[in-house]
Amino acid sequence: MSNEVVEALEVWIDQDLCTGDGICVQYAPDVFELDIDGLAYVKGEDAELRQAPGATVPVPLPLLTDVVDSARDCPGDCIHVRRVSDSVELYGPDAE
């Protein structure tokens, strides 16, 4: 068993850049959902969409790979995954 500490991550979508392609929903339907406006939003454990600009939800550890793949493959480059502790973006258009 690994003693590696996995840091808490959060994800958000910049709807201004979202193309409505839905790749994120295919990868991680528990985290992303297309709304009636055709754009993707993050959703919380309560399955409610977070529609405020810049709204974040925690990345569930079992879905981390799916969320990261979504950020990498998103045609709109609008998915941001960052560390909760210091808000450093690890995956997405602003990642180092």
Image (cartoon, grey):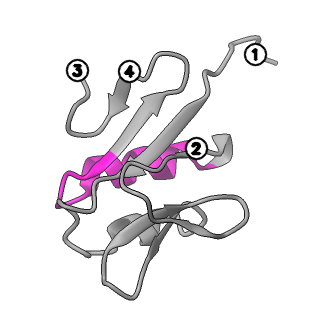
Please provide percent x and percent y for residue 76: 17, 59
How far apart are the two marked residues, 2 and 3, measured between alpha carbons? 19 Å
Q: Quadrant of residue 26?
A: bottom left
Q: Which circle, 3 or 1, is nearer the viewer?
A: 3
In terms of sequence position, does the residue under pointer 4 or pointer 1 come before the other? 1
Residue 35 is left or right of residue 47, and the answer is: left
Query: Is 69 included in the stretch rendered in magenta?
Result: yes
**Could you tell me which residue is drawn at 31 percent across and 75 percent down?**
39
Amino acid type at circle 3 is Glu
- Verify whether residue 57 appears in magenta: no
Tell me which numbered mark, 1 or 2, is placed earlier along the sequence. Answer: 1
Front-most of 61 and 53?
53
Which stretch appears magenta?
Answer: 63-79
Mark 1 closeness class: few <14, some 14–19, many ≥20 residues within 10 Å: few
Which of disc 3 and disc 2 is earlier in sequence?
A: 2
Spatial separation of the CA atoms under disc 4 and disc 3: 9 Å
Q: Amino acid at mark 4?
A: Val
Q: Which residue is mark 2?
A: 59
Mark 1 or 2: in front is 2
Q: Nearer the viewer, mark 4 or mark 1?
A: 4
State the mark number for residue 2: 1
Local SS, label 3:
loop
Circle 4 is placed at which residue position?
Answer: 88
Callout 3 environment at 10 Å: few (<14), some (14 to 19), or many (20+)?
few
Query: What's the amino acid at mark 1?
Result: Ser
Q: Residue at x 63, y 58 (%)?
A: 44
Where does the N terminus fall, quadrant-wise?
top right
Residue at the far bottom in the pictured view: 36
Q: Earlier in the sequence, mark 3 or mark 1?
A: 1
The residue wearing badge 3 is 96
- Which callout, 4 or 3, points at the residue further toward the start of the chain? 4
Is 2 positioned to the left or the right of 37 in the image? right
